[in-house]
Amino acid sequence: MSKYLPLSDRLAREIADQWRPTLAEIEEVLGFPLPKAAQQAAWWGGAAEKPHHRAWLDHGWRAGDLDRASGTVTFHRDTAAHEVQPEVLKAASEAATKTVHTQRAMGAAALIGAGVAVAAGIGVLAAKLLKGRRA
């Protein structure tokens, strides 16, 4: 397990397409200080050759724009990796919507059926009461 897993988890939960934390905020997420090399742009760049790169690349993010003056790093959602996701989410959403509509229709049918049964029961009871009064 990578020591950068907390950063990976943080990015996996991010809703926005950009996250711009300070180095101190990243250290807070990680629970340990970043190496001195993290103050250089090269540490944030590159493909998946380092464990810290996997922390963001595994969740469709790329790191860039280290601003040494403000001590911030800007993470951007990798749009090429992210564009595949909406189709998967769309299919899952449509399936869930279809299930909900089916369940609602079944619930409505059950409710209507129960209403008919109650009305029929009241009708039978009324008929028995009227028949009893005539006798």
Image (cartoon, rainbow, N blue to C red):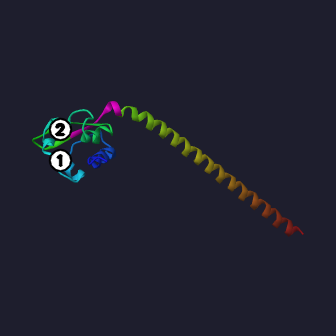
Residue picked out by circle 1: 34
Residue at image mark 2: 43
* Marks 1 and 2, the one that precedes in the sequence: 1
Residue found 55% across the figure and 44% down from its top: 99
Disc 2 residue type (three-letter)? Trp
Q: Quadrant of residue 98?
A: top right
Secondary structure under the numbered disc 2 in the rendered image:
helix
Q: Is residue 51 above or below residue 114?
A: above
Position of residue 47 in the picture relative to residue 125 (left or right) = left
Residue extending farthest to the right is 135
| Residue 38: in magenta span | no
Q: Position of residue 45 (x, y in %)?
A: 20, 34
Task: Bin the neighbour count of mark 1 within 10 Å (Cα to Cα): few under 14, some 14-19, many 20 and up.
Answer: some
Q: Position of residue 97 (x, y in %)?
A: 52, 42
Q: Residue at x 50, y 38 (%)?
A: 94
Start-end of magenta stretch? 74-81
81 vs 14, nearest the viewer: 81
When the figure is inspected, residue 17 is found, relative to residue 128, above or below; the finding is: above
What residue is rendered at 41% in x and 35% in y?
A: 86
* Residues at marks 1 and 2, CA–CA distance in whole angstroms: 11 Å
The kind of secondary structure element at disc 1 is loop
Indicate left or right for 121 with 38 as reference.
Answer: right
Is 80 inside the magenta-drawn segment? yes
Q: Nearer the viewer, residue 52 or 13?
A: 52
- Residue extending farthest left: 69
Q: Nearer the viewer, residue 19 or 46?
A: 46
Residue at 51% across / 43% down in the picture?
A: 96
